[in-house]
Amino acid sequence: MNYSTIINFDQTDLVRTICTQKSADQNDGVWKYGEEGALQNYEALAKLFGISLSDIVHVKQTHTAAVRIVTREDGGEEILRPESVSGFDGMITNEKRLLLCTLQADCVPVFLLDPVQQVIGMVHSGWKGTANQISVNAVRRMQKEFGCRPSDILAAMGPCICGDCYEVGEDLLDPFAVYYSEEERSCFFRKGEKKGKYYLDLPEAIRIALQRDGLKEENITKPFSCTLHDDLFASYRKEKDPVARMLTGIMLV
Ligand SMILES: [Zn+2]
């Protein structure tokens, strides 16, 4: 399985991270979401992490801004059995050897780690989740449930569509006006060449929200790659494949 990692997270020796990639001759890093063959992908992933399928946790991913606390009891959902609850796009745990996973093709995977309290989070943040502050919700849950301090928390964004590639319509301006000031919006919306079109920089919108909520700028890592112009990663806009996804995950070791 080809993959990259969030280097500064893995360097803490507290966690292991993964962002699956395609390889030149095969598509083994592409998750065929909910399709035949997905189980083999999960088996390879479990082997790589030295865990069992029941140690992998998912969320249903319906573009909400809701975050759930997960435990080993939630392991194996959507792999070995259907998910018990839906309506969440982010998850948090303090349990070791429990791999939190999201799947995406252009949306932003947000990794969270509090190295002090040893709590992790994995968030799926498309434009809706970003507009509705899902990453901030995750940080606040970490504070409330586990006593984490935002100034201790590290955040990293995995490969996603970048602000130069993500062209959107003007209908997206209003949803971002709920939580972002005009000045903040001008940092991540740029007028496109075509009438009524804008370029939206989701990672910048996420950075602003996290920093506003108390994370230190130096603790927020922007994506190392763009899914649209880097062929190693699955992109819906590029491939128009409704099921091809990149898996991203984080586990306390
Ligand atoms: Zn790009």
Image (cartoon, grey):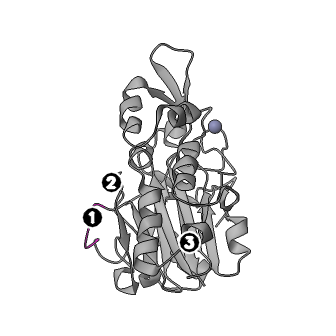
- Tell whether label 2 touches label 3 (CB within 8 Å): no
Q: Looking at the figure, which quarter contains the C terminus?
A: bottom right
Please state the extent of the stretch shown in magenta in the rendering.
Answer: 83-87
Q: In this view, does 189 lie above or below 19?
A: above
The quarter of the picture where residue 8 lies is bottom right
The quarter of the picture where residue 80 lies is bottom left
Tell me the distance, in whole angstroms, between the alpha carbons under discs 1 and 2: 8 Å
Q: Is residue 118 above or below residue 40?
A: below
Q: Name the residue under label 3.
A: 250
The residue that appears at 67% across and 56% down in the rendered structure is: 23
The residue that appears at 60% across and 80% down in the rendered structure is: 49
Relative placement, left or right, of 161 versus 3 is left
Amino acid, disc 3 = Ile
Along the line of sight, the residue nearer the viewer: 197 or 80: 197
- Mark positioned earlier in the residue sequence (1 or 3): 1
- Tell whether label 2 touches label 1 (CB within 8 Å): yes
Spot occupied by residue 83 in the image (x, y as percentages of width and height):
29, 71
Disc 1 is placed on an element classified as: loop
Spot occupied by residue 55 in the image (x, y as percentages of width and height):
46, 83
- Mark positioned earlier in the residue sequence (1 or 2): 2
Along the line of sight, the residue nearer the viewer: 132 or 163: 132
Q: Residue 37: tell me if it is visible.
A: no
Q: Mark 2 points at which residue?
A: 62
Amino acid, disc 2 = Thr
List the single residue furthest toward the top: 195
Q: Mark 1 points at which residue?
A: 86
Q: Does the magenta stretch include residue 17?
A: no
Amino acid, disc 1 = Ser
Spot occupied by residue 67 in the image (x, y as percentages of width and height):
37, 65
